[in-house]
Image: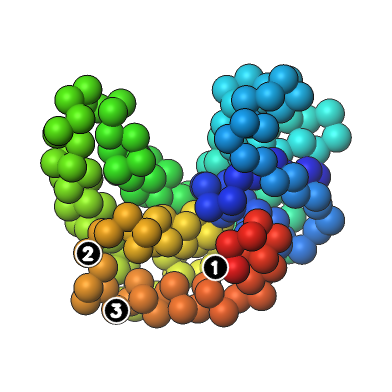
Amino acid sequence: MKLYTKPGACSTAVHIALQWAGGPFQAEILDGPSMKAPAYLAINPAGAVPALVDGDFVLTQNAAIMGYIADTHPQAGLGGDGSARERAEATRWLAFVNSDVHPAFKPMFSPARYIGEESEHDAVKAAARTLVRGLMESADRQLADNTWLAGFRSFADPYFYMTVRWAHGTGVDMAGLDNIAAFKARMDADPGVQATLKAEGLA
C-alpha cells in the first residue's frame, strides 16, 4: 500500500491508522504544489489528500480509506471485533468526525469560501470556533467513561486526534475538556502516532 499525505491534514490520520494496522506501506509526503501537479492529479483528479494505492486499486476519501484499512488488516481491530455492532459503533464515531467535526473547521481555514467581505472573516472564524467547541463538548462527554471514542481503539481515533490538534492550532476554547486532554496525551505518547508525526515532520 502507498499513502499520499500532506502533513497535518486529515490524511495524517490515515497514516496513523496504517501504523496501527501493522502491515507494510509507503507514505509519500505532498505539499500544496505537488498535490496539483500532473503526476498526482493522475492518481486523484481532485488534487486532494488522502489517496491510497493498493496494487491497481486507487481509493480516495478519508472515511472510505479507513474502512479499507480496517477490512484488509482485521487483526488490528480498527473496525471492532468483527461484529456488526462494533463496526457500526466505530463507523458512527468516524462519521461524527468526518461529517460534523471536520467540516466545522472549514470556515476557519478558508473564510473567503463562505463570505467575500474580508472584514467579516474574523466573525466567520469566531462562529466556527463556537461550533467546534460544542462538538468537542459532545466528544468530551463520550470520553468520560471511554478511553477511546467507540469504547475501543478504532479508526475514528486518529481522525479525531487530528481535529483536536487543529482546535488547539486555531484558537478553539478547549478549557475544561479534561477527557479530551487525556485522550490527546494518550495519543501523543502512542508509538504509531509518534512515528507518523516524525515521518511527516510534525513531531
| Residue 1 percent across, percent down from the top left | 80, 45
Residue 153 is marked as 1
Circle 3 — which element? Answer: helix
Query: What crowding class fits label 1: few (fewer than 14 Cα within 10 Å), some (14-19), or many (20 or more)?
Result: some
Reply above or below: 182 against 116. below
Give the residue type at disc 1. Arg
Mark 2 vs mark 3, CA separation in Å: 12 Å
Circle 1 — which element? Answer: loop
Nearest-to-viewer mark from 2 and 3: 2
Q: Earlier in the sequence, mark 2 or mark 3?
A: 2
- Residue tagged 3: 178
State which quarter of the image contains the C terminus.
bottom right
Q: Residue at x 60, y 76 (%)?
A: 190
Residue 99 is marked as none
Mark 1 vs mark 2, CA separation in Å: 26 Å
- Residue tagged 2: 173
Circle 2 — which element? Answer: loop
Q: Residue at x 71, y 27 (%)?
A: 40
Q: Is residue 104 visible?
A: yes
Give the residue type at disc 2. Asp
| Residue 78 percent across, percent down from the top left | 61, 59
Q: Earlier in the sequence, mark 1 or mark 3?
A: 1
Give the residue type at disc 3. Asp
